[in-house]
Image: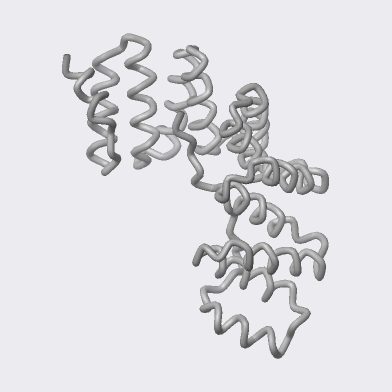
Amino acid sequence: MTTCHDNQISSDLRADRDTIEDIERKLTQDPDSPSLHYNLGLALTRSKQWEKAILEFRTAMKLRPGLLEARVNIAGILLQKGDYDGCIEESLKALEFRPDLVEACINIGIAFSHKGVLDQAQKSFEKALVIDPKSVVAHLNLGNIYLASGNFAKAIEHNSHAVQLKPEFGMAHNNLAVAYFQNDEIEKAQIHAREALGLGYQVNPEFLKQLEN
């Protein structure tokens, strides 16, 4: 099952694009600035310096306890590192303060998917869609769960939503093609497989051979 991670690490609208060195220099002047620590965490995340990023996000949270985006970002990093239990724990803590954090719900869903606990993953993605019915990532991952369980109609429904919301998303077209193929709707599968290829997505060559036969 291909899990979509597009928005597993949230970004702060106020975050600048300064280099790590620039932000560290600013911190020497203002070491108690939660925004600077948070932005440094983002910069370190972009450069995949995971442990240092987590430290900066935790410092930002100490200085500004309501900065839940920092906790969501920590959860996203833990997800990237394969620490699924840690990701779930951090995400649940964020949801205690703000139950409408869609990114936290998605992180939990992805973590449970990797753990193979698909019923819990499904609940998390469904919760994400209650909060944001236009979440492409939630629709895509929920479609994957239904595909894995053999509910092809539901898989088509959610992958279709993902394609409608983001027509340029090659993975969504690919997953919709697979769902149609499993539902014996070959022509529709071929259409979306071609769309995925046209968008630069690497469709499984074996799947393409199956579509041709």
Closer to the camera, 172 or 89?
89
Closer to the camera, 189 or 62?
62
Q: Quadrant of residue 83?
A: top right
Residue at 69% over, 69% down: 56
Task: Residue at the far left: name it.
Answer: 212
Measured as percent of width and height from the top left, residue 42 is found at 59, 66
Q: How is the image coloured?
A: one colour
Left/right placement of residue 151 relative to residue 208 reads right
* 128 w.r.t. 20: above or below: above
Left/right placement of residue 146 relative to residue 13 reads left
Left/right placement of residue 198 relative to residue 31 reads left
Viewport quadrant of the C terminus = top left
Residue at 64% over, 86% down: 26
Measured as percent of width and height from the top left, residue 28 is found at 69, 88
Residue at 46% over, 13% down: 153
- How many marks can you see? 0
Q: In which quarter of the image is residue 163?
A: top left
* 114 w.r.t. 187: above or below: below
Measured as percent of width and height from the top left, residue 82 is found at 58, 45
Measured as percent of width and height from the top left, residue 71 is found at 71, 55
Residue at 35% over, 31% down: 173
